Amino acid sequence: MNQRHISLIGAPTDIGAGARGASMGPEALRVAGLAATLEGHGLEVQDRGNLAGPANPWLPPVDGYRHLNEVVAWNEVVHEAVLAELRLQRLPILLGGDHCLGIGSISAVARHCREAGRKLRVLWLDAHADFNTSVLTPSGNIHGMPVACLCGHGPQELVRIGGTVPALNPKTLRQIGIRSVDPGEKRFVHEVGLEVFDMRYIDEMGMRHTMELALATLDANTHLHVSFDVDFLDPDIAPGVGTTVPGGPTYREAQLCMEMIADSGRLASLDVMELNPALDLRNKTAALAVDLIESLFGKSTLMRD
């Protein structure tokens, strides 16, 4: 994997979300200068444009899932696009789009790691655990289910994307910033044994200690994937998301999180999800997301050697 060669992949859909507008996320990130910002760090960036998929019919759930066929179609397209970039030894950045697309993206990363004989670590930066099932949530919105699907719990059409069930071993996952989990979902997370660094943990132990644990045991054969849901951030600084939850990381905590990921030298793929320009203020949240992505690729506030 060459960290110097970046591919931007737009996935303009809110097919799995409970609010419209995340479909505009990729363009907002472009308008905020993502490509030029990365190029400013000496990276070679290719923008592959936007993927195409079915429109959002905005219908109620059927058998516990909203828009299942459309969600499957989008995730299959995302899977193939991310996998193609990884096979070219490029670093894909998926521009969402809602977080249901993490199924296609992370299943592609996991598939690539199996093919290449590499270990995988996934950092899931989010206010939500996204470990719901149709039994646990009445909404049927699949953006609340991607982690469960990746771990083998969900409709077979989604669980099987990538050809291996489960696509992801729960032990490869670290969730950071969690602060909104349904009661049934919480029990399920405990049963499966996900490693979760919730906001209470971050408040008590600090972001530095949290990230030291989340990044522990990485080595030269580890592919590090970051799935960054913008609602990870406190809504006071990042209002442009559909599912705001108060009490998230501050700007400095988020910067430290990203800088420590960069310091590991292992970042090999990235999702930027749930940015909703329809709910934003003059593209403020997109600009913040680009600022934090820049930190993932080398911008640092560190003065000492």
Image (tube, rainbow, N blue to C red):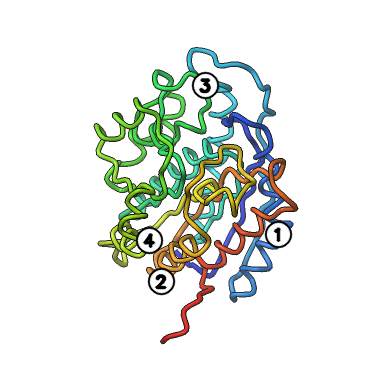
Q: Secondary structure at mark 3?
A: loop
Of 90 and 143, the residue lying toward us: 143
| Res 217 → quadrant | bottom left
**Quadrant the N terminus occupies:** bottom left
Q: Residue at x 53, y 39 (%)?
A: 101
- Gap between marks 1 and 4 measured at Cα: 27 Å
| Residue 263's disc number | 2
Q: Residues within 10 Å of mark 2 (few under 14, many from 20)?
A: some
* CA distance separating discs 4 and 3: 32 Å
In this rendering, the label closer to the viewer, 1 or 4: 4
The residue closer to the viewer here, 59 or 93, is 59
Residue name at image x 36 percent, y 47 percent? 198
Task: Find numbered disc 4 in the image and state the secondary structure of the residue it sits on.
Answer: helix
Q: Amino acid at mark 4?
A: Met
For badge 1, the amino acid type reads Ala
**Would you say the residues marked 1 and 2 are in contact, meaning their CB atoms lie under 8 Å apart?**
no
Which residue in the structure is indicated by mark 3? Answer: 139
